[in-house]
Image (cartoon, grey):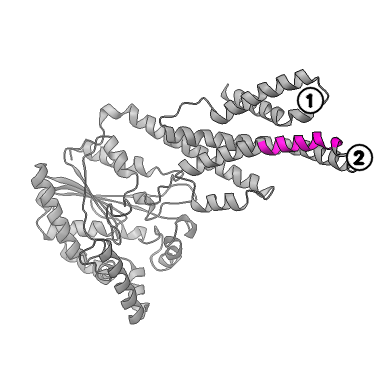
Amino acid sequence: MHIFVRILNWVILVFGINSPYILRDAPTLVKIGVWAVLLLYFLVVNIFPTWKKYPNWRLKILGDGAELILAFWVTCAATIPFAVLLIREIIANWGSGWYNQVFPVTCGIVIIAAEAVIFWNGILRVYATSVQLRIKHRVLGLVFGFIFPVNLVMLMIIYIKTRNEAIFETEKILLDKSRQDDKICATKYPILLVHGVFFRDSRLLNYWGRIPAALKTNGAELYYGDQQSALSVEDSAKELAKRIEQIVAETGCGKLNIIAHSKGGLDSRYAISKLDCGKYVASLTTINTPHRGCLFAEYLLGACKPKLKEFVEKAYNKVFYVLGDASPDFMSAVKCLTNSYCEEFNKEVIDDPEVMYQSFGSKATNRRSGHFPLNISYPVVKKYDGDNDGLVALSSAPWGEKFTPLIPKSKHGITHADMIDLNRANIKGFDVREFYVQLVSELKERGF
């Protein structure tokens, strides 16, 4: 029924846009009546493109914008034959007097104005509200907006992305509402999210994307490691240990469930085993952590000239000192990611038998899977370490009693950044927010 109504809307829109030409021989009163009705309908459709219910205003504006873009695409394509007729009539009547050009010119103005209203109404809505529409799509949409027929192709791409986003986000909200009372993420012990290297948890950019909101919606109690962006594992672990002790003391929770990404997994293991934090940790789940290091990092340290390494180190440390790090140490952090360091690390840092360890790892499918700089690093890591997520080899990620590889069937794959929702991308075949919800839900079921 919904499809039938949509098709009817398109037919009426097409007729309305071309009514000046279609009704040219009709009586004046008929023209005025038809035009008035169609004008009213046209305004209503532009204000309320669909009557579909959405869970919030952002998705309502986004979904309606996508429908308007589709309406523009269809009506624009359907108007082409009429535009050709109008042009032919203008050419045929050329030189016969200006009064013979009034009607076809007026029709052309009506068509252009109507299409412009539909287009700008739709495009402004999706540009203002879409999260999945990337900068490149927005720029290409503007660049090719007046180049036929490329503009229609770009509009269809924009329509598909924004419509899918509206549908997907609506389904997620409805899913969370349906299980809200179950609080499936309300674990016995709070969750501590520990970030990886070269980022902070919530300074300037939220490291964990939309994940924390999804976990809290389903009942999780969350805290952050908040260690500096770049330090050696030993120094990061000291900051993390203080943070763990602080949370336990302030909340009286007794223990924590740690979920750590990338180098954060090494920091957490060291804090548990070497800094007496095992008594405060119920479980450690590592996400794409280089437990066996990265041959790629080893190669970079050996291949880069000393002056270049010194320049990069000073530049990074200076920038992140300004951004809030007390004592950033870029080079020490990189050295801790090498294969040789992790080999010695694993010999000395022994797992606490009272803590449950588990791990996850993902892989990208090609260099196009990730954004800069992962699209550049992927083929290099592939050469040295094999299947990887753009930084960490899949073979380096396993640790603990259970390792789960995440390899979706889609062409995209899952990158290092995708695992923390850094790009806020909805990946076909992998819902990162639901992944964390189910991960924490399993911890709850196991009594953690």
For the question of whether residue 354 can be seen, the reply is: no
97 relative to 399 in the view: left or right: right
Q: Which mark is residue 23?
A: 1
Tell me whether the residue at label 1 lies in contact with that at label 2, contact meaning CB atoms closer than 8 angstroms. no
Residue 382's place in the image compared with 52, above or below, is: below
Image quarter hosting the N terminus: top right
Check disc 1 and give the amino acid type.
Leu
Q: Is residue 77 left or right of residue 47?
A: right
Q: Secondary structure at mark 2?
A: loop
Q: Which mark is residue 231?
A: none
**Separation of marks 1 and 2 at Cα, in angstroms:** 23 Å
Amino acid type, mark 2: Ser
Is 10 displayed left or right of 106 in the figure?
left
Q: Position of residue 338 (x, y in %)?
A: 29, 69
**Who's the residue at 24% across and 69% down the image?**
329
Nearer-N-terminus badge (1/2):
1
**Which residue matches tag 2?**
96
- Residue 444, picture quadrant: top left
- The residue depicted at 17 percent of the width and 65 percent of the height is 234
**Percent position of residue 195, x then y:** 27, 55
Seen at 74% across and 39% down, the residue is 80
For the residue pair 413 and 37, the one nearer the viewer reads as 37
- For the point 58% across and 50% down, which residue is it? 142
Work out which residue is located at the far front of the displayed protein and give it.
Answer: 98
Frontmost of labels 1 and 2 is 2
Quarter that holds the C terminus: top left
User: Which residues make up the magenta segment?
Assistant: 99-113
